[in-house]
Image (cartoon, rainbow, N blue to C red):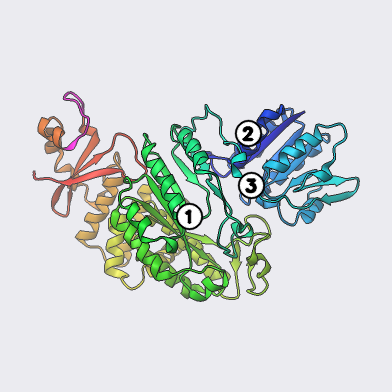
Amino acid sequence: MKILLVSLDSKFIHANLAVRYLRNFVLDDGFDIEIKEFTINQKEDYIIGELYNSNADIFCFSCYIWNIEYIKEIAIILKEAMPNIKILCGGPEVSFEVQKFMEEETYVDYVISGEGEIPFKEFLHQIHSKKPKFKKVNGLSYRENESIIINRNIEPVQNLDIIKYPYLEDDSFEEKIIYYESSRGCPFSCSFCMSSIDKTMRNFSLKRVEEDLGKLLKTNARQIKFVDRTFNANYKRSMEIMEFIKNNNPKNMNIHFEITADIINEEFLNYLINMPVNMFQFEIGIQSLNEETLCEINRHMDIQKVYNVVSKIQENNNIHMHLDLIAGLPYENYESFKKSFDGIHALNVEKIQLGFLKVLKGTKIYEDKEKHKIKYRKTAPYETYCTKYITLGEMLKLKQIEELVDKYYNEKYFEKSLHYIIKNMFTESPFEFYEEFSEYWQTNDLYKISHGRKKLYEIIYKYMVYKDKITDEFISLLRYDFVYNNQREEIPTYLNRIAEEKFRIQKRSLAVDEKFKEKYFKNVNKDDKILNDFRLVDIGGNATIFIYENKSNIFNRCRTYKINI
């Protein structure tokens, strides 16, 4: 009997953690088991063809909000074409309202709710026996004659070390993001979050975590992303894990953690001072700065302490931070969301991530949806489109603003020019810049099509022309941003192309100057050609050299120096 574990990831660079846990947990039990991993961006017919040709007997789908609609379409086609196969679904998207799900999706034979390793293993042993006794498998729901049988819930695994290392020894994960967890559960009870359901926080042993990380840090992955909901819940433990990574990370791999800022103490802050530059990345869920909202969603947060902690981490200039906001929360109207945005924008972190409330089955917000008149899409990802406090029109406006924040703020292609605009035109409210810029996009039909990066520079230039705010300083700063982020692109005419062309002869001379090479270029041999590795451009009346790194870096694209010509 062949068992196929199927995942549909949101992007190719992601490596699904759940199916690998399941496979490795039963690897020594003699089952014929295999993983098939796809993305939601691949053609459905291709995925169906791959699954059909696998000759599997049981198809086990890992279900999340980003893939459930795809899985439904694929699974029913497989079942109707091959009536003898069995379909099993597991994951957070099918762990709640199981009766309703199985009544609606009649082609699904089995559902595993909650943590899947133990029930999946017991299920496989039962299905391989002559007389399966599915009622013994806690966490399993199944069909028996015309009835749907829902067994009692499985208790969360307390000794996480029995869960095997999820990856294989020869996995290289070239340029992929690896997901990893050192704990399960969360000590907090945020009403919108699935993690609030499991209030018992459990840890893998430090010995086990270090063994796992020792393997993962030797791969060619782009990033290790910890999925712990609150990595720093135990600050001493988190410091030990970070210390191990720092000392065993020869490729300087980037490590991403989700942390809670207002529980950080002075000892942890002082520890972070000596962390390597760009090795660690913190995602901090702020969600809102509205006190009434925070209270309603069980988010008990010391806002002033968050400000202080984020500011102190920023002073070190060694850890990248992403701050999250959620639109559509209870008591959060358009004006209060604007204040929340302005509050975190003032912190000047690397990314501001604007999300929209998702009403997930099993959460408290799902129970409170009528109380707050939360209207949301009835298909995944169940995103809110209006509430008692914010209209559909306002939410759509925030959607457009989110797109511009992502294109212009988060990508860091416009740092100096954006800073100029906000400092000189929108000092009181950076949100009002994005709001007005969004209206400019709307008026000029710019949302209708996608735009390459080069076009985005032209759009913001034309916006400043429209505002009658073009100055030599702005043009110079936008030119800096353009050259810094576009090694091969010719400077557009509107940014004064002569600013580079006038240094053409001097650049050629510098490219063969041994003292220049020695001073500005690392690991360059005497005979190496460097002409295409730097640019020489006038920025604000100063000859500025832009030196592009030979190997791309997700944080630092280029080094710049003012030089005398």
Residue 526: where, in percent of width, then height?
16, 25
| Residue located at (65% from left, 47% from top) | 157
Q: Which mark is residue 24?
A: 2
Can you identify the residue that label 1 sits on? 234
Asked which quadrant contains residue 118, the reply is: top right
Q: Which residue lies under the disc numbered 3?
A: 67
Residue 320 appears at what percent x and percent y?
37, 52
Q: Residues within 10 Å of mark 2 (few under 14, many from 20)?
A: some
- Residue 535 left/right relative to 342: left
For the residues labelled 3 and 2, say whether their Cβ atoms are less than 8 Å apart: no
**Magenta span of residues:** 520-529
Q: Secondary structure at mark 1?
A: loop
Describe residue 326's horizontal placement relative to residue 243 as left or right: right
Q: Which-is-in-front pick, marks 1 and 2?
A: 1
Give left or right: position of 487 versus 515. Answer: right
- Spatial CA distance of label 1 from label 2 is 28 Å
| Residue count near mark 3 (Cα–Cα under 10 Å), binned few <14, some 14–19, many ≥20 | many
Whole-percent x and y of residue 251? 37, 34
